[in-house]
Image (cartoon, grey):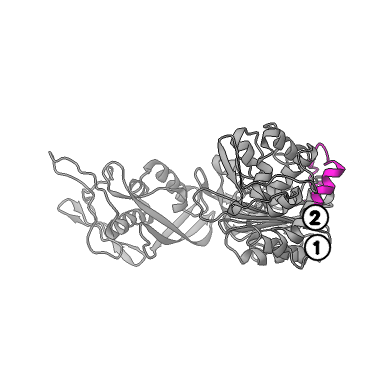
Amino acid sequence: MGKRRRVAERRNTRPVVVGGVIAAVVGVAGIGAYALLGGGAAAEDGSTSAGEKKSVRTGPLSAAEVTGAAQRFLTAWQQGRVARAADATDHAAAAKSLLTGYTKQARIKDVTLTPGTRQGDRLPFTVKGTVSYKGVDKPLSYGSSLKVVRQDSDGAPVVAWEPSVVHPDLHEGDRLVTGESGTPPITALDRDGGELTAKEYPSLGLVLDGLREKYGKTAGGKAGVELQVVRGKASQAEKLSDKTILELSEGTPGEVKTTLSPTMQSAAETQVASRARASVVVLRPSTGEILAVANSSRGFNTALQGSLAPGSTMKVITSSLLIEKGLASAEEQHPCPKYFSYGGWKFQNDDKFEIKGGTFKASFARSCNTAFISQAPELADDDLTKQAQQVFGLSRNNWAVGVPTFDGSVPVQSDASMAASLIGQGGVRMNPLNMASVSATIKAGVFRQPYLVDPSVDDRTLATASRKLSASALSQLRDLMSYTAAYGTAAEAMAGVTGDVGAKTGSAEVDGQKKPNGWFTAYRGDLAAAGVVQAAGHGGETAGPIVAGLLKQGG
């Protein structure tokens, strides 16, 4: 750490207790001695005598180096020595800015930092302090962690700077601010008039933040005083909403009624809780109303804002395209070879299976990749993009749901990437909201934009599709999905789901993952749902039971 000074200050300093360990700066022959977290020896700083060549330390960090670097940072932060704390990181300017704001903008004082147990090069710690604003004080407590790395210039151990060190909800460019909230609080209501809270429905925390951001100023409430995460440009681009960390004084909430069903939302919460990284959305095809939104991971709303390759669930859209262009028909023979090469890529089916002399219905039900890839030579580069936009209302970035959403992306591609997009890989990106809408469009026969707040509340215009599927294509799609639910890859998950049903499974390979993301989209009566379980395996086995369980719940 080139900027750190080891010269003793000519004044008395008192020990600072950090997590029960005393860190003292003591004047001894011009050298400051640091007591390390849980250790005895001080970490060296790599300084050299005049005339010596400076060496750069390399190799894995020792326990003493990790705890020593963490101690220097945490002690300086707790003492309010912002410049010294910033110099203990690998990005002093950014650290100094955020740590300065911690006191001046967030108005947090009397900070106590308590380290946990070191885990390799990471150290968790808890933060306790007091938020003070215009005579109102309120205690604050939360957990965070830091990582120690070697500094490029000399190999000295320093804290790897990232905003989440200061608070886990902070991203690049975000700030912590305490003051009168610019946005009054809201009370979100379900479709029956009951209150929706994150305590009762944990998945709705980010949804409630989004509702407040959009409707707080118009719902009739009055702002209170809060400590908030105020999003920067990068977070705003990702459609992340400002987040309340601590409420110092209550505002008066306005009311916002949603389309969520308390019964369905509760069931969705239960379903996703059974698997890590699971997300699901339930819609009403006849109206577009969103009945449930749930994620087992709370940090990001994958259900509404995720951007993931949808795998073979995309074959619903691709099938509609092939049928309308006369390149496939449900009951006619259709090729499903083990392999098919296009654009320099060699594509294959799961376990390299093939269907000899089979129909397109058989290929759809068994999710034969090559049955779709083999039609790539007959398609224009923009055919799939137009089909997704014109029939299914996707990839236009114009949905007005009531909270931030990602509306799917089906970019124009060429060669192998275009072929891969036909089976939901390549550049195609979706989330459970998008894929639930695809099933809802097949069930209803027309695209109805999903929404969480009735458009009459704020006179917003819902997105529409420019055309419907042809009657023949729609009939065949329903037949394909019904057959898949009964006899294809979705049959096991859909067992016991009775009535007018249809389904499609999907698995999407992701670089760096041993297992694919599992997808499932389906409808039953006037319900449509889709889900994804990331890095878990095939959709019929992972997301399928979640979606099927919710369709059963619907009656």
Quadrant including the N terminus:
top left
Amino acid at pointer 1: Asp
Ranked by sequence position, the earlier of labels 2 and 1 is 1
Amino acid at pointer 2: Arg
Residue 386 drawn at (x, y percent): 73, 35
Q: Which mark is residue 192?
A: 1
Quadrant including the C terminus:
bottom right
Residue 51 drawn at (x, y percent): 12, 38
- Which range of residues does the magenta coloring cover? 452-479
Q: Secondary structure at mark 1?
A: loop
Q: Give the residue at x 74% y 60%.
A: 487
Please give left or right for residue 30 compared with residue 82 in the image: left
Per the model, the C-alpha gap separating discs 2 and 1 is 16 Å
From this viewpoint, which residue is outermost toward the front?
A: 357
User: Is there any visible trace of residue 219 in the rendered image?
Assistant: no
- Of 426 and 137, nearer the camera is 426
Magenta highlight on residue 456: yes
Q: Give the residue at x 38% y 54%.
A: 147
Whether tag 2 and tag 1 are in contact, CB under 8 A, the answer is no
> Where does label 2 land, which residue?
284
In this rendering, the label closer to the viewer, 2 or 1: 2
User: Is there any visible trace of residue 49 in the rendered image?
Assistant: yes
